[in-house]
């Protein structure tokens, strides 16, 4: 296959070229972008530049990408709960316990491997281990996830996530009676400086704040029980572990979350109670708005039933 071209306009005055590109193209790593810049494959207003170039605003960017490489990923023939499919995308109701894409320690039996058995050709942009992946869910978070089946669809869907025009709704069960019952949590998230495997709210002005990113989660209580609250969460940003971190930060960690909440399992749960229940987006073929829903899986519904039975 031949090389590919990406053209876009960056409106990020004052930002470094590599940082602005990373925000515009989240599917590519900063190191990959810096390598392309160094090789002269990224032109700014028709000229080569350095990664440290400070942008003035509205620069025209032209990126030449090498031909896609073979992924070497092995298809995994396992059933998929497909809630929507057309020539451009799949919307899958992911089971808890399945990692979205291959990584260290999870080279096989991921959602990507399963999708490759259903759709052998997926677009690879920037990272050959994540073909077709538009966004991610944690391993133990169940629910709806979009996979693109071609490069055009991947670009369109990633753009919708970047511009925050996609509506995502999650259901969570928190420990305690959530107060206030509805609010927006606005707190930057970054790597926990004491444990790099965790995320954390980073206070502004702290030494770790340079690597924190703005994060907002809107929530509203649906049902309040004696010791728990069923809550609807609408993340406005898409940071790693965002809902789990934010709810724990305000004092109401998600039930079953042994990383950000209580170490002891609750209600017979074997994972945290978090489910991506609804997605609203514009499909790439004609930009018609679609809403796809997936009700609570059996394990989470069983936990709710257990609460109801003790009332």
Image: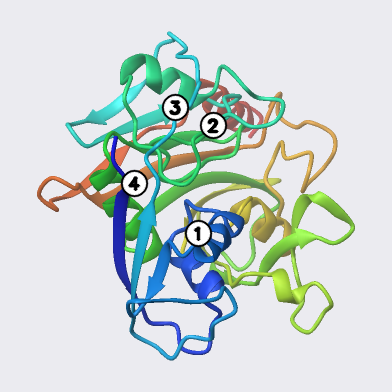
Residue behind mark 3: 70
Crowd band around label 4 with a 10 angstrom C-alpha radius: few (<14), some (14–19), many (20+): many
Q: Residue 231 location, x and y as percent?
A: 53, 51
Q: Which of 254 and 158 is in front in this view?
A: 158
The disc placed on residue 279 is 4
Q: Nearer the viewer, mark 4 or mark 2?
A: 2
Q: Residue 49 location, x and y as percent?
A: 49, 77
Looking at marks 3 and 2 on the same chain, the residue that comes earlier in the sequence is marked by 3
Q: Residue at x 51, y 65 (%)?
A: 37
Q: Which of marks 4 and 3 is in front?
A: 3
The disc placed on residue 36 is 1
Q: Nearer the viewer, residue 115 or 200?
A: 115
Crowd band around label 1 with a 10 angstrom C-alpha radius: few (<14), some (14–19), many (20+): some
Q: Distance between the residues labelled 3 and 1?
A: 19 Å
Residue behind mark 2: 101
Q: Distance between the residues labelled 4 and 3?
A: 31 Å
Q: Nearer the viewer, residue 308 or 40?
A: 40
Crowd band around label 3 with a 10 angstrom C-alpha radius: few (<14), some (14–19), many (20+): few
Q: How far apart are marks 2 and 1 (CA)?
A: 24 Å
Looking at marks 4 and 2 on the same chain, the residue that comes earlier in the sequence is marked by 2
Total numbered labels placed on residues in the image: 4
Secondary structure beneath label 3? loop
Q: Which residue is drawn at 47% across and 20% down?
A: 113
Q: Residue furthest top?
A: 77
Quarter of the image with the C terminus in it: top right
Q: Residue 13 location, x and y as percent?
A: 46, 88
């Amino acid at each position: 296959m031949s090389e590919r071209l990406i053209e876009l306009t960056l409106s990020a005055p004052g930002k470094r070229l590599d940082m602005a590109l990373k925000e515009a193209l989240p599917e590519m790593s900063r190191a990959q972008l810096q390598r392309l810049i160094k090789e002269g494959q990224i032109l700014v207003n028709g000229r080569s530049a350095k990664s440290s170039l400070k942008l003035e605003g509205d620069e025209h960017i032209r990126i030449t990408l090498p031909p896609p490489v073979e992924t070497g990923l092995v298809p995994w023939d396992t059933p998929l709960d497909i809630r929507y499919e057309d020539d451009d995308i799949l919307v899958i109701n992911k089971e808890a316990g399945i990692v979205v894409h291959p990584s260290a320690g999870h080279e096989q039996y991921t959602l990507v491997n399963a999708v490759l058995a259903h759709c052998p050709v997926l677009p690879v942009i920037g990272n050959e281990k994540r073909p077709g992946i538009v966004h991610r869910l944690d391993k133990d978070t169940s629910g709806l996830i979009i996979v693109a089946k071609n490069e055009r669809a991947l670009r369109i869907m990633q753009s919708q996530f970047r511009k925050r025009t996609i509506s995502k709704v999650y259901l969570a069960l928190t420990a305690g009676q959530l107060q206030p019952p509805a609010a927006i949590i606005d707190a930057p998230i970054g790597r926990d400086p004491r444990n790099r495997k965790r995320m954390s709210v980073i206070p502004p002005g702290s030494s770790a704040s340079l690597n924190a990113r703005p994060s907002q989660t809107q929530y509203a209580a649906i049902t309040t029980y004696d010791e728990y609250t069923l809550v609807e969460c609408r993340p406005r940003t898409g940071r790693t572990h965002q809902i789990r971190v934010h709810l724990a930060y305000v004092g109401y960690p998600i039930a079953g979350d042994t990383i950000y909440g209580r170490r002891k399992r609750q209600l017979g749960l074997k994972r945290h109670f978090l489910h991506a229940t609804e997605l609203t987006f514009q499909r790439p073929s004609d930009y018609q708005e679609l809403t796809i829903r997936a009700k609570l899986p059996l394990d989470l519904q069983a936990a709710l039933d257990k609460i109801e039975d003790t009332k």
